[in-house]
Amino acid sequence: MIKIINAVLAVLAGVGGAMVLYFVLNFAVERLPGKWEHRIKPYVFIGPALLVIGVFLIYPAVQTFVYSFANDDSTEFVGFQNYTELLGSEAFRRTLLNTLLWIIIVPVVVVVMGMAVAVLADRLGARSEKTTKTIIFLPMAISGVGAAAIWGFIYASRPPTQDQIGLLNAVVVGLGFDPVAWLQIDTGKLNSLLLMVIMIWTQVGFAMVLLSAAIKSVPEETLEAARIDGANEVQTFFRVVVPQIWATVITVFITVLIGVMKVFDIVYTTTNGNFNTNVIAVQFFNELFTNGNNGYAGAIVIMLMIAIIPVMAYQVRHFKKQEAAS
C-alpha cells in the first residue's frame, strides 16, 4: 500500500509540477509586450522539453562518445585503441555475427508470420477473429524477461536421471532419447535460433495488428477488379494487396529491426551471452558492469548508434513520403 501511495503521489507531483511550471511561464510571458510575447512563447513551451532531452539524451550521448576514446576508467585518452581491440577480437566478431543473424532473420520472419496470421484471422468470423487475434497478441504484453522465463521452461534441460520439466526434453525423453541442452548447442547456431524464436513469439502479434488493419483498408473495388481479370487469390494478394500495404510492411519491418538491434533481456536472462549466443547489447552490459571497462562499453554503444542511425533516417524519410502522399 505504501508503494502504491508513493507512486500516486509521484504521478500527481510530476503532473502537477509540470502544470504549475507552464502556468507560471505562460503568466510571465503574457506580461511582455505583444510582439515579444509572440516571439518568446513558443520557446517557453518547448524549452523544458528541450532541456530534458539535452540533459538525459544529448549530454549522455556526447559523454559516451568521449569515453569511447578513453581507457577503462576514463582517466586517459587512448585514441582508437578500444575500437581496434574490439574489432580485432574474435569473440567480439562472433558477437557481431550473432547480432547480424538476429537482424537478418527476426524482422523478416516476424513480418511474414504477422502477415500470414493477419490474412488467416481475417477469414474467420467476427467473434473467432477477435478471440484469435487477442490470443496471438497477448505475448506482446509480456516483458522480454517474462518471455525468456516462459521459454526457459520449454528449453529447460536436466540430467537423464532426473525428471524433465522442459517441454521439449519431456517429449525427447518420452521418445526414448537422452535430454538435450538446447541453449548450449552452437552447431548451426541452433541455440541462437531458439532464442530468436522467443522474440518472434512476442512480436508477431504486433505485426499482425498493423498488417491486419492495413489489409482491411485495401479498397474492395481493386480486389474485385483483379478477380474479374482472372487473378486467383494468391495472385490477388501478392499483386494487388501487398503493393497497397507495402508502406505498412516497411514500417513494421523497421520497427522490429530497431528493436532487434537493441535486443538484450532475452539473451541476458537465458544464457548471458554464453555458448556463443552473445549480442551487442549484452556485450555492452558485461563490459560496463561486469568487467568495469568504460572504454570498451562506450565504443560498443557508439558502433551500435552508428548502425542504427541510417535505419532511423530511412524510417523518418519513409514517414515523410507517406505524409506527402496522403
Image: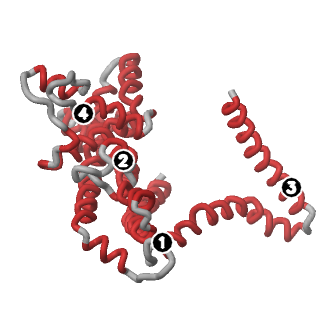
- Amino acid type at mark 3: Val
Nearer-the-camera pick, 34 or 173: 173
Residue at point 15% right, 34% down? 180
Q: Is 172 positioned to the left or the right of 100 in the image?
A: left
- The nearer-to-camera label among 1 and 4 is 1
- The nearer-to-camera label among 3 and 1 is 1
Q: Quadrant of residue 234?
A: top left
The answer to whether any part of residue 213 appears in the image is no
- Amino acid type at mark 4: Tyr
- The nearer-to-camera label among 2 and 3 is 2
Question: Which element type, helix, strand or loop, lies under badge 1?
Answer: loop
Residue at point 86% right, 55% down? 24
Q: Which residue is mark 1?
A: 73
Residue at point 21% right, 30% down? 158
- Amino acid type at mark 1: Asp
Q: Which residue is mark 2?
A: 268
- The nearer-to-camera label among 4 and 3 is 4
Distance between mark 1 and mark 4 Cα atoms: 39 Å
Distance between mark 4 and mark 3 Cα atoms: 57 Å
- Amino acid type at mark 2: Tyr
Distance between mark 1 and mark 2 Cα atoms: 24 Å
Distance between mark 2 and mark 3 Cα atoms: 46 Å
